[in-house]
Image (cartoon, grey):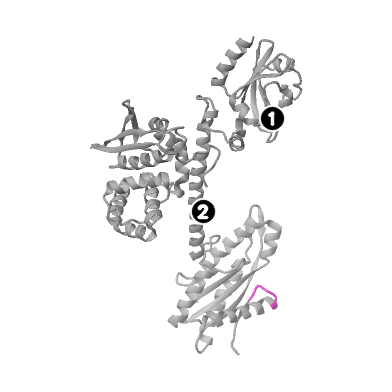
């Protein structure tokens, strides 16, 4: 028996260095070198198998007979000693005892670190070292991909910050408007500023939802573009705020007609998904002709004042600012 | 050419000679970009131009630059991850040499569109080996000499290496292992991780 044990042990030491040979009484008679390395300072030979391992699955496995009956199926077990390394295992009956072969399974990364394992601790055919290679290679490749993504994201944000377009409506944004106003102011050409704030828009958003709100904003954008000329500028400067820069001699009568037409069109019901959205708009206007030396910043502030007059007077109307 | 290769050349110049030298190289090579992306692909022409430009700005023969790149890839702290991946190839230097045959396959496991030159290691006995490369990048054998020299150092082995020249796309390196355990070498802990 001892000679047979020695022979089997010698074979298993080469093929599977994480094996345990058990006697019929469930005591360890021999272990592979790697398993012994996992339990430094403890002599495994002679220990009862159930003192050495906790069998996690199948749960009701308590005796040597249970173990032998579980032959061939997968066991989940762990060392009772810290760091309670987990294994997968498989049992093969041998004589009146059994052999259990263990592997780390997915716990391998921790195990290699916890126990300072080296290539020599694995059988020559074991794929563990290849797997560790893959884990590192994958991490390195992921890291490179992550860095690329970070840089692309940075570039996207930078590009967005420099953009002149409001992505929802395709109109100019606040940045573009500032640019147009600076240029128009420098050129000294006459122009009119219309500051439009939608009325009842919040109600659309609140009752029909944001998609309906977005649809309305796109419809408003289309109306504003249709009611202005190529050389004019239409910008969305806030959630439901728009600014129009109308180029050319600003005759109050003509600008007032444009404002009225815009408001009338805004008030036409906008169908959305089987429902109808109703809004209107209030407009404040300032005209470069009203000033000795027109300053776009000042004109924006005055158009704002006029807008609030329109709001105060009951909305859905326009007001032209008249300097005192 | 894979971005990893171009990026390796860039990092070598930056880490060894500084960003100013890299900027000079970019200008000399007339590149559209001042940094390569490791995960993109570039025209083969670009790689050739960068190598020639680097040789010019560093004032060294192109073959020497290539060998220095090979050494850099294994020995610089910034490329520790790569050294570790190479060390997975074998427990000792001879073991590592034999793993070179599967290096292109290993590289593809890590990055599936990275095509390294086909490598063929022959063992002539008496500690003498030859390594044949089949490469589209002229002078890649010199990169391998740099890699092998640095890996020998890593394993603590003493070797002599010489480039036997090229016939078309085929280059050959002679390797003589003078002393497998010449020095202690650097440690390789399976469970450690490169940053």
Apparent side of residue A232 relative to residue B26 in the rendered image (left or right): right
Q: Is the stretch drawn in magenta largely helix, strand or loop?
A: loop
Q: Is residue B43 visible?
A: no
In the picture of the structure, the residue carrying the numbered disc 1 is: A79
Which of the pair B37/A178 is nearer the observer?
B37
> Where does the magenta region start and end?
A312-317
Is residue A315 highlighted in magenta? yes
Q: Is residue B134 visible?
A: yes
Q: Crowding near pointer 1: few (<14 within 10 Å), some, many (20+)?
A: some
- Residue B157, by quadrant, is top left
Residue A28: percent from the left, percent from the top?
68, 20
Q: Chain of mark 2?
A: A
Label 2, label 1: how far apart the Cα atoms are: 42 Å
Q: Is residue B17 above or below residue B160?
A: below
- Residue A271, by quadrant, is bottom right
- Which residue occupies 29% across, 47% down? B64
In the picture of the structure, the residue carrying the numbered disc 2 is: A150
Which of the pair A48/A185 is nearer the observer?
A48
Q: Is residue B51 above or below residue A53?
A: below
Residue B99: percent from the left, percent from the top?
41, 31
């Amino acid at each position: 028996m001892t000679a047979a044990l020695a022979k089997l042990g010698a074979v298993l030491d080469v093929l599977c260095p994480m094996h345990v040979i058990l006697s019929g009484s469930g005591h360890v008679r021999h272990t592979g070198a790697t398993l012994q390395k996992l339990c430094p300072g403890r002599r495994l030979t002679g220990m009862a198998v159930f003192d050495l391992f906790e069998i996690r699955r199948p749960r009701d496995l308590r005796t040597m007979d249970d173990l032998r009956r579980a032959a061939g199926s997968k066991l989940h077990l762990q060392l009772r000693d810290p760091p309670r390394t987990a294994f997968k295992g498989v049992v093969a009956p041998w004589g009146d005892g059994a052999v259990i072969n263990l592997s780390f399974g997915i716990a391998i990364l921790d195990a290699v670190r916890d126990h300072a394992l080296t290539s020599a601790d694995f059988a020559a055919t074991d794929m563990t070292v290849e797997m560790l290679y893959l884990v590192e290679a994958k991490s390195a490749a992921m890291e490179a991909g992550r860095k690329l993504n970070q840089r692309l994201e940075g570039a996207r944000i930078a590009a967005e910050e420099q953009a002149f377009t409001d992505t929802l409506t395709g109109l100019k944004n606040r940045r573009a408007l500032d640019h147009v106003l600076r240029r128009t102011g420098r050129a000294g050409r006459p122009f009119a500023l219309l500051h439009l704030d939608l009325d009842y828009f919040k109600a659309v958003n609140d009752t029909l939802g944001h998609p309906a709100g977005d649809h309305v904003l796109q419809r408003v954008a289309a109306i504003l573009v249709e009611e202005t000329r190529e050389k004019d500028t239409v910008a969305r400067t806030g959630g439901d705020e728009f600014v129009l820069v109308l180029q050319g001699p600003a005759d109050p009568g003509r600008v007032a007609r444009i404002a009225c037409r815009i408001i009338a069109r805004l008030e036409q019901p906008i169908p959305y998904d089987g429902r109808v959205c109703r809004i209107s708009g209030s407009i404040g206007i300032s005209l470069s002709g009203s000033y000795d030396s027109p300053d776009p910043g000042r004109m924006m502030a005055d158009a704002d004042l006029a807008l609030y007059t329109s709001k105060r007077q009951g909305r859905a109307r326009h007001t032209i600012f008249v300097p005192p | 050419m894979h971005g990893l290769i171009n990026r390796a050349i860039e990092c070598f110049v930056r880490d060894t000679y500084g960003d100013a030298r890299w900027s000079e190289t970019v200008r000399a090579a007339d590149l559209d970009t001042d940094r390569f992306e490791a995960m993109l692909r570039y025209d083969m022409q670009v790689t050739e131009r960068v190598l020639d430009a680097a040789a010019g700005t560093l004032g060294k023969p192109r073959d020497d630059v290539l060998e220095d790149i090979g050494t850099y890839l294994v020995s610089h702290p910034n490329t520790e991850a790569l050294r570790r991946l190479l060390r997975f190839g074998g427990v000792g230097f001879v073991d590592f040499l034999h793993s070179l045959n599967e290096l292109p396959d290993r590289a593809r496991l890590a990055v599936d569109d990275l095509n390294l030159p086909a490598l063929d290691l022959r063992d002539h006995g008496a500690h003498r080996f030859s390594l044949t490369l089949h490469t589209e990048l002229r002078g890649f054998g010199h990169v391998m000499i740099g890699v092998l020299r640095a890996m020998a150092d890593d394993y603590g082995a003493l070797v002599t290496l010489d480039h036997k020249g090229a016939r078309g796309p085929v280059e050959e390196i002679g390797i003589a292992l003078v002393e497998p355990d010449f020095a202690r070498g650097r440690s390789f802990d399976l469970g450690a991780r490169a940053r």
